[in-house]
Image (cartoon, rainbow, N blue to C red):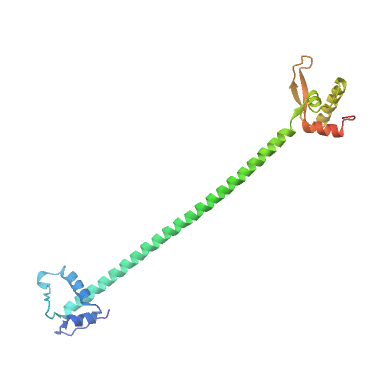
Amino acid sequence: MNDITVHRDKRMTTSEVCEALGCDRVTLMRNWREIETCAAPEQVKKIENGKPTYWTEAEVTLLLEKMKGNANNQHNLLSQMEGIETSQSRVLRLQMLQKQMQDIYEAEIAELKTKAEVLTAANETLEIALNESLKYFTVAKYNRQYKKGWGLLEAQRIGKQIAGYCRSRSIEIRPCETNDERFGAVNSYPLTAWEDFLQREYEGAA
């Protein structure tokens, strides 16, 4: 917007003012109406349709200042809008980042659950195998279940030998209650100890 110089006592037509201010008639008149809202009644310019309107230096100067002020206000408004848009963009970026982090977290949780399920299944399998390996048998039970055919004297001898075998290797020996009043409780030995004992230690084992 160019600075306007109006010679003293020289008036300008509306077209000349529009050209000098670089605006159209509608913009010019809108700005002037805004000026008049703050002006005294005697300062209100009479504009008649169909007749030329002349503008004094003071009026053109008022228009120029008003339009500069409006332009500054518009610039400030645009700056505020840009600031709002920037803030909104930051919020949206944060929301997207939070969503990405949530997706990553949920994926990791799902992966951990899958691993936990696999480990649980493996532990169950191991536990079953361990329980199988830790089955305890008395001499009589082992003789009967595995059909060894040991007689009473042989079974007694085997009982002493496997007891010594387990003690020498710190293998747990568990007492097992019986219904026979003559014996009360007898020793039982883990299945793994039985198998190793028979393979390595017991002479004449079937």
Residue at the far left in the pictured view: 42
Q: Quadrant of residue 29?
A: bottom left
Picture coordinates of residue 60, whole percent (x, y): 19, 78
Query: How far across and how far down the image is residue 50, in percent?
Result: 12, 79
Check the picture and name the quadrant holding the N terminus: bottom left
Q: Given the current orientation, which residue lies at the most extreme top position?
A: 181
Instruction: Specify the quadrant of the image occupied by residue 158.
Output: top right
* Relative vertical location of residue 85 with respect to residue 30 in this rendering, above or below: above
| Number of numbered discs overlaid on the protein picture | 0
Q: Residue at image x 42%, y 58%? A: 92
Of residues 41 and 149, the one drawn nearer to the viewer in this rendering = 149
Q: Residue at horizontal 19%, vertical 69%? A: 34
Vertical arrangement, residue 101 with respect to residue 197, above or below:
below
Give coordinates of residue 186: x percent, y percent. Answer: 78, 21
Visible residue check, residue 30: yes
Q: Residue furthest right?
A: 204
Against 141, residue 1 (above or below) is: below
Nearest the viewer among 76 and 17 is: 17
What's the residue at 48%, 57% (across, down)?
97
Residue 169 appears in the rendering = no
Q: Is residue 85 left or right of residue 135?
A: left
Name the quadrant of the C terminus: top right
Q: Position of residue 70 (x, y in %)?
A: 25, 71
107 sits left or right of 15 in the view: right
Would residue 136 appear left or right of 110 to someone viewing this image? Answer: right
